Structure formats: C-alpha cells, structure tokens
Amino acid sequence: MSTGQRAPARPAPTTTPQPPPAGTPEPARRVRALHTARTVTVYQAYAPALGDPAARDGRFPAAWKRERMTWIKPSFLWMMYRCGWATKPDQERVLAIEIDRAGFDWALRHACLSHHDPSTQPDRTTWQRQLKTSPARVQWDPERDLHLRPLSHRSLQLGLTGEASRRYADEWTVTITDVTPLAHEIHHLMRTGRTTAAAALLPDERPYPAPEETPALSKLTPTPAESLPDC
C-alpha cells in the first residue's frame, strides 16, 4: 500500500475502455468508474477521526471495524448526494479509495442483490439464503447529475461484509486519497453557477467491464477489455 495524499485539483484520467459514441442510450444498470488496467476507484465518506488517518497512512486504521458491512460507491456524484458535498455529520471527509480490480471483480462475482427482485430471481427463498451467505451486496440506485438530481439510469453501490470487508481493508486497497477539497471546490462552482467549470473537475468515470455475474447488470454487447484472474 502506498502513502495517502491530499487530492490534486483533478484525478488522473483513465485509459480504457473508451466512452460510448455520442447519442448512445445509457443502460439502466451499468458500472461506471475511474479505473486503470489494474485498479478501480471507489468513494466513501467518514468522520475526520477515521478519514484523516486513513488518508495520511494510505490504509484503514485499526479503529475501522472490519467485522461490519461497509458500502463503497464508484460514482463520485452519488457519493456527493449521499454525504451532501461532505457537509453531513460524520461524513466530512470524502475518500477516494483505489482498489485492486481483481478484488473488486471478486466481490461482484460473489454478490447478491440487497433487495429481492422477482424479475432476476423469482425464488425468494433462494435469494434469502444467498443473502445470508454472500460476502457482498449489490444495490442499484439512481445516478445523480451535478445538481444531485436523479437520472434515469442507475449507479452501483457495493456492500462488503465478512471476508470481503476484511480483504477490502487489508488486501485490495492500493491508495487512499482525501478528495474533500475537490468536493468543496465543485460544490462552490455549482453554487456560483459555474456548471461547466464544475463538470471539468469531475473524475473521469467511464464504463467498467464488470463481470457478467454481477447481479442485475444490464446486458450489453461485448467490448474488448483486458481480463484479470479471479482473486
């Protein structure tokens, strides 16, 4: 793991895959994330007592409870909606956690939906059994725009518990960066009507080639993407 750091003015761009052509409808449920060939960036918000040492040391402190479920969000704007631009109590530090893609994909492959969806799993009993044993939960919530208004397509939230939570904290994490200053800067630009400038600072979240086993993922035409071994 590398040492944590304060956020630059704008996160580094990703390299692959390319964004869809202009005018292409956004699938109802697709993972979009800032990612490289080996890592994917997710967001969480914490109180300063946890967020500051995590960013300083580049790892989660012992006080971070590994036995509890933790939710990670690849969408920066959904994180802003959830934490109110880092203004809500105990969410004043927004962290960008860069994690190993193999671990992220492992969690998606071993996840179940957080709520029963008859359209994807008619047998409620089977879903309840999976919910008790799965180390990860998938939830699809409306994506947000810069005004934090809901969009028609949905964004991934990934809940990690048990083995997945421990591996996230102690194995998969590569870097932890405090992006609270970035959140405040974008919020200030929006409050002063400079939407274009605010949009230019957003992380470069592009379609992510999530495993086909990801619960309720919209089926897409396959695109070339690098493959990674299971974790």
Image (cartoon, rainbow, N blue to C red):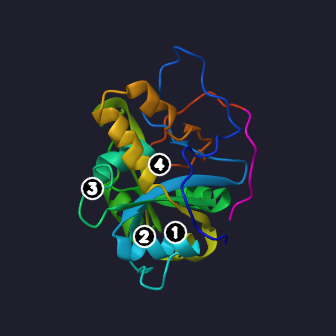
| Residue 223 in sight from this viewpoint | yes
Local crowd size for mark 4, using a 10 Å CA cut-off: few (<14), some (14–19), many (≥20): many
Label 3 Cα neighbours within 10 Å, binned few <14 / some 14-19 / many ≥20: some
Per the rendering, the mark at residue 51 is 2
> Would you identify the image quadrant in which residue 103 lies?
bottom right
Q: Secondary structure at mark 4?
A: loop
Dot 2, crowdedness within 10 Å: few (<14), some or many (≥20)?
A: many
Where does the magenta region start and end?
A: 224-231
Report the amino acid beneath label 4: Pro
Q: Residue furthest left?
A: 89
Give the spatial CA distance, label 4 vs label 3. Answer: 32 Å
Question: Is residue 58 one of those drawn in magenta?
Answer: no
Q: Nearer the viewer, residue 210 or 144?
A: 144
Quadrant location of the C terminus? bottom right
Q: Which residue is mark 4?
A: 215
The residue where tag 1 is placed is: 55
The image position of residue 108, as x and y in percent, is 54, 55
Q: Nearer the viewer, mark 4 or mark 2?
A: 2
